[in-house]
Amino acid sequence: KALAAESAGTWDAAVLAWRAAATYVPGFRDTDLRTRNALFHWAEAQEKAGAWRAAADHFAEAGAGTWGDGNRRAASILAALGNASVWAGTCRQAVRDLRAAGALIGVEAIAGDLADAERCAVTTAVILPFENPSGASPGGLVLSEAAAEGLSVALAKSASPFVHLLERGVTEQIKAEQAITTAKTGAPSSLTRAHYLVVGKFSQVKVTSGAPTATPVTILGKAPNMCKRTGADGVTFTEPCMQDAEVRYLDHVGKREVRLAGTVRVVMSQSGEQVAVVPFDVRRSAEVHWADGFTNASGKPVRLVEEGTVDGPDVRVPASVLALKNAGRTLPEEDDMVRDAMAEVANAAAKAALAVLDADPAVTDPKTLEIVEL
């Protein structure tokens, strides 16, 4: 079957037949070599038909040692595809193809082309300090800098190696160069070393916090007492009992809320075109709720025990009241809440920004390809 398929030039069928033969008698005379030769000829036919990637795959399967060296033929096609991708602007695909070519025959053969593709594939961005017209600095934080730094960290964690974020020191240097260029030419200049600028603005910075409120509350608990009873024989006597007893206390509630609202924008450095807008409106709130100052109706302090206990202190109250007595009384620090809110802003903005900064364009292989054998 394999020989007949080869004679007919149906190389896919020949490969299948040679591989089937090898399953019956592994290592049979020349089976591996004949399989790889059929793969090589199949790849040649695909190359002539313009099925470049299929041809490269089958040349690589044929491998070294076949007539014409399948690895080198595969690498030549991949290198040609890589260079065509650079011209088409799909440089990440160019990097993948050229690296694949280098893996087959050694990276030194395509080092120059690969370096060009890697430079082309990189997207640079500058994260500028957020505008904060309110001038607010809750918790002593410089929001403009802290927000930009948080966004930089979020982007760096999620971005591919193709996204390069310029360091803040470099950014300042670029801005200085920009100012010099503007002064010399009289025309505004862009940050030429960055493809994109990521800018943010706070439209609202608000922290609401104040002294906890204290509301007097009165409830009925149960207190042990000696109660008078009259027996069936008319004799009066006393016995231990539980009677309703007023419990008075102060119910304290403390609240703190942080709100950060605004937008993050991704802007093309050269043209100033806005390519992504991310609105944000993040709220963080915290509440503490506790009770103290427990007294009876006469104003004397009372001890509390959970309702249902048989023995114990002065007054039995529901578990919910005891929980208030033992509740925490400290609100989170203002700067911690602001940082949490900014982290949420940064994560949401990073996701949207990366859709632009880390985009991997769809690739369409060329209809014609100039292949230079490496």
Image (cartoon, rainbow, N blue to C red):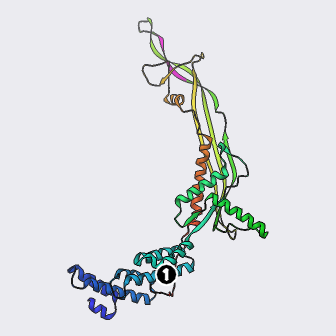
Q: Most extreme residue toward the top, as rendered?
A: 235
Q: Please say if 134 is above or below 13.
A: above
Res. 299 image quadrant: top right
Badge 1 local density, few (<14 within 10 Å), some, or many (20+)? many
State which region is magenta.
220-228
Image quadrant occupied by the N terminus: bottom left
Q: Please say if 26 is above or below 249.
A: below
Q: Is residue 53 left or right of residue 268?
A: left
Q: Most extreme residue toward the right, as rendered?
A: 186
Q: Nearer the viewer, residue 243 or 63?
A: 63
Q: Is residue 360 left or right of residue 74?
A: right
Residue at image position (67%, 44%) is 138
Q: Please say if 2 is above or below 261.
A: below
Q: Is residue 324 left or right of residue 135?
A: left
Residue at image position (32%, 87%) is 38
Residue 91, horizontal then vertical, whole percent: 54, 75
Residue at image position (53%, 79%) is 85
Residue under label 1? 81
Q: Nearer the viewer, residue 373 or 137?
A: 373
- Secondary structure mostly seen in the magenta stretch: strand
Residue 111, horizontal then vertical, whole percent: 49, 76
Image quadrant occupied by the C terminus: bottom left
Q: Is residue 65 left or right of residue 276?
A: left
Task: Confirm whether residue 278 shows in the render.
Answer: no
Residue 125, horizontal then vertical, whole percent: 61, 64
Q: Secondary structure at mark 1?
A: helix
> Three-letter amino acid code at disc 1?
Leu
Q: Please say if 148 is above or below 298.
A: below
Residue 268, horizontal then vertical, whole percent: 66, 68
Q: How many marks?
A: 1
Res. 24 image quadrant: bottom left
